[in-house]
């Protein structure tokens, strides 16, 4: 099959490379010429484990190509995926669909023969209808179907998620489009990944409902963690205990500093907006958004409390800045709000992140960046673990202790058992495990 990806950002690039790896002929298009030139050389603009080699091998095999040219590839394509960004619109929080609409117009002008146009970008309910209307307006004779096929890729695990998904959701009621989409996903279907067909609007809502549910689940366990600290319970065991009930499940129950990233914050807010617009408010999601926002600053207060109630003049060493490990993405990272709040309270911040420092430098001020955990620990009054990169899972506490002014670890991801850290003479403060002054 000949597939075209409009947009060679995170979703377009991962999906394009994986489809090519399954043997399809894929062309990824982007407007930014410099990006396309480096992709043609096999250079990947994002950090995603396994993506570089996959792009390079498929480029070499001739199954994957990159171009800024729209017309030729779209004219020859069986399927055109719209994988452009849908950022939060400044001012009102609605998803900004201008890139999606612009892509629809360009596709309409270039398409020839029956073409399936698939929205992969996360788009609010009804966007498929609008894309269809735009294409028809632009090219009344076009033979096409518009399908919704949301992506559920997690950054850092995107290739595994693409190749072995829990499900593939396809929103179309057009039998010709259904046949084409079955063919597109045949390699995954053979891997036993269920294809779930439904109406286009249902499919669009599945994406938002799924992300909002996961965001609620995280927020729920975070509030349970707070309660654990008050009543002397252990949130990790509560999570395990409830997770063993298969109706609940054990995933997405890690208490921490709140969710961040490019999806949950944006998608929860967009769902709230859509619900309000349709006079069908989603109060649980509204509350999730509000609770998650306040959580980040609450984590800063937790650090201050752990430091004895005052951080003025103290030096805090932050381990991990990205919104989660295995990505260089700093979007909506809890570390940003935590650092700001601690600086507001007079602390000096040092920080280390394996991949995110470059982006973090642009998004913070006054932070001193170091090259490893030990360097930033020099003279520090506390070590604050914000993002659970693997390289923080086996820290040399004896070495750290020798360097720090105060041996204190505030572990906002519950990476360590308290006893292990305390054995080395450290004070340990986790999330939802035991009261700070216990
Ligand atoms: C998410 C969805 O998982 C994916 O299906 C969707 O398509 C895009 O959004 P992603 O943003 O890459 O993926 O990250 P994810 O692993 O879901 O984590 C999101 C945030 O929640 C991170 O900040 C993470 O640290 C936090 N999180 C996750 C928790 O705090 N606790 C958990 O138990 C799980």
Image (cartoon, rainbow, N blue to C red):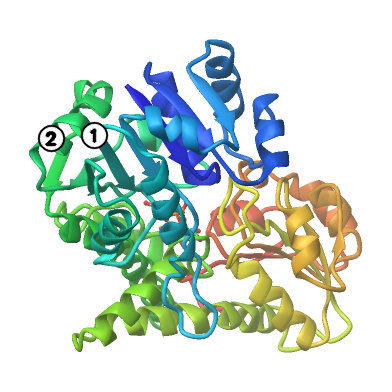
Residue neighbourhood size for the residue with mark 1, other residues' Cα within 10 Å, grouped as few (<14), some (14–19), many (≥20): some
Q: Nearer the viewer, residue 225 or 12?
A: 12
Report which residue position mark 1 lands on: 114
Q: Position of residue 203 (x, y in %)?
A: 20, 55
Report which residue position mark 2 lands on: 176
Compared across the picture, whether 362 is left or right of 134 comes to right
Q: Quadrant of the C terminus?
A: bottom right
Cβ of mark 1 under 8 A from ligand 1: no
Residue found at x 26% / y 58%: 128
Q: Earlier in the sequence, mark 2 or mark 1?
A: 1
Q: Secondary structure at mark 2?
A: helix
Q: Secondary structure at mark 1?
A: loop
Q: Nearer the viewer, residue 258 or 199?
A: 199
Q: Position of residue 169 (x, y in %)?
A: 22, 45
Q: Quadrant of the N terminus?
A: top left
- The image quarter containing residue 436 is bottom right
Q: Position of residue 206 (x, y in %)?
A: 22, 58
Q: Nearer the viewer, residue 93 or 40?
A: 40
Q: Position of residue 143 (x, y in %)?
A: 22, 41
Task: Say above or below: 330 vs 107.
Answer: below
Q: Nearer the viewer, residue 285 or 388?
A: 285
Label 1 near label 2: C-beta < 8 Å?
A: yes
């Amino acid at each position: 099959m000949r597939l075209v990806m409009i947009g060679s950002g995170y979703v377009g690039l991962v999906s394009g490379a994986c489809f090519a790896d399954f043997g399809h002929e894929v062309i990824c298009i982007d407007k930014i010429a410099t990006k396309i030139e480096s992709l043609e050389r096999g250079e990947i603009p994002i950090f995603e484990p396994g993506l570089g080699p996959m792009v390079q091998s498929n480029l070499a095999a001739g199954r994957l190509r990159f171009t800024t040219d729209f017309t030729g590839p779209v004219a020859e394509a069986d399927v055109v995926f719209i994988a452009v960004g849908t950022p939060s619109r400044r001012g009102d929080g609605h998803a900004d669909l201008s890139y999606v609409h612009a892509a629809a117009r360009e596709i309409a002008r270039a398409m020839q023969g029956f073409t399936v146009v698939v929205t992969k970008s996360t788009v609010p309910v009804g966007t498929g209808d609008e894309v269809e209307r735009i294409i028809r307006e632009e090219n009344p004779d076009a033979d096409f179907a518009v399908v919704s096929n949301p992506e559920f890729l997690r950054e850092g695990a995107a290739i595994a998620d693409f190749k072995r998904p829990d499900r593939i959701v396809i929103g179309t009621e057009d039998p010709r489009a259904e046949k084409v989409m079955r063919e597109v996903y045949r390699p995954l279907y053979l891997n036993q990944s269920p294809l779930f067909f439904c109406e286009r609007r249902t499919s669009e809502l599945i994406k938002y409902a799924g992300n909002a549910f996961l965001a609620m689940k995280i927020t729920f366990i975070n509030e349970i963690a707070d309660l654990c600290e008050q009543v002397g319970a252990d949130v990790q065991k509560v999570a395990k205990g409830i997770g063993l009930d298969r109706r609940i499940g054990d995933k997405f129950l890690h208490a921490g500093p709140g969710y961040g990233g490019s999806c949950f914050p944006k998608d929860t807010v967009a769902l709230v907006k859509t619900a309000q617009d349709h006079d069908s408010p989603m109060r649980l999601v509204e509350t999730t958004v509000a609770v998650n926002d306040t959580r980040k600053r609450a984590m800063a207060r937790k650090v201050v409390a752990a430091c004895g109630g005052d951080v003025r003049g103290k030096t805090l060493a932050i381990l991990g800045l990205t919104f989660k490990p295995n990505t260089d993405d700093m979007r909506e990272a809890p570390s940003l709000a935590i650092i700001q709040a601690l600086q507001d309270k007079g602390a000096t911040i040092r920080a280390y992140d394996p991949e995110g420092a470059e982006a973090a430098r642009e998004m913070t001020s006054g932070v001193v960046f170091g090259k490893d955990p030990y360097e930033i620990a020099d003279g520090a009054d506390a070590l604050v673990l914000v993002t659970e990169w693997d390289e923080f899972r086996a820290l040399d506490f004896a070495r750290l202790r020798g360097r720090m002014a105060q041996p204190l670890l505030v572990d906002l991801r519950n990476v360590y058992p308290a006893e292990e850290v305390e054995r080395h003479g450290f004070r340990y403060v986790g999330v939802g495990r035991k009261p700070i002054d216990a």
